């Protein structure tokens, strides 16, 4: 999935220091607070979370805009809310 630098991010969620399954649980709670069409950006510092968070969002019908590795142990995931749960 390509990086989209022109996306307006509605909310930033910094989950560095968190581990699975808390990374997805906290991400899911955060996106539930957004309106349809808004974008959540999640910062992660472990590979498992960086792999599982976007996959779980896709499985729940949300639009994953990008998953970027920013450094040796840091990732950014951007997700657009496309459905209510």
Image (cartoon, grey):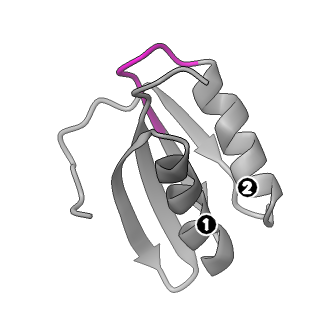
Q: Give the magenta part as a residue range.
A: 34-40
* Nearest the eye: 45 or 26: 26
Q: Secondary structure at mark 2?
A: helix
For residue 23, the mark is: 2
Q: Which quarter of the picture shows residue 68?
A: bottom left
Work out whether residue 18 or residue 49 is closer to the camera in this orientation and state it: 49
Was residue 69 drawn as part of the magenta stretch in this picture? Answer: no
Q: Main secondary structure of the magenta part?
A: loop
Mark 1 highlights which residue?
Answer: 52
Identify the residue shown where x is 24% and y is 36%. Answer: 7
Mark in the foreground, 1 or 2: 1
From the viewer's perspective, tell me whether residue 38 is left or right of residue 12: left
User: Residue 77, image x and y in percent?
Assistant: 46, 55
| Residue lying at 46% horizontally and 59% vertically, measured from the top left | 76
Q: Position of residue 57 (x, y in %)?
A: 53, 48
Q: Residue at x 55, y 42 (%)?
A: 60
Label 2: few (<14), some (14–19) or many (≥20) C-alpha neighbours in 10 Å? many
Q: Quadrant of residue 45?
A: bottom right
Q: Is residue 17 left or right of residue 40?
A: right
Q: Residue at x 50, y 67 (%)?
A: 75
């Amino acid at each position: 999935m390509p990086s989209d630098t022109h996306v307006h991010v509605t909310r930033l969620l910094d989950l560095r220091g968190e581990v699975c399954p808390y990374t997805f649980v906290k991400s899911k709670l955060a996106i539930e607070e957004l309106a349809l069409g808004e974008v959540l950006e999640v910062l992660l510092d472990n590979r498992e979370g960086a792999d599982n968070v976007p996959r779980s969002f896709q499985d729940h019908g949300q639009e994953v805009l990008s998953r970027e590795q920013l450094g040796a142990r840091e990732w950014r995931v951007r997700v657009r809310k496309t459905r209510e749960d």
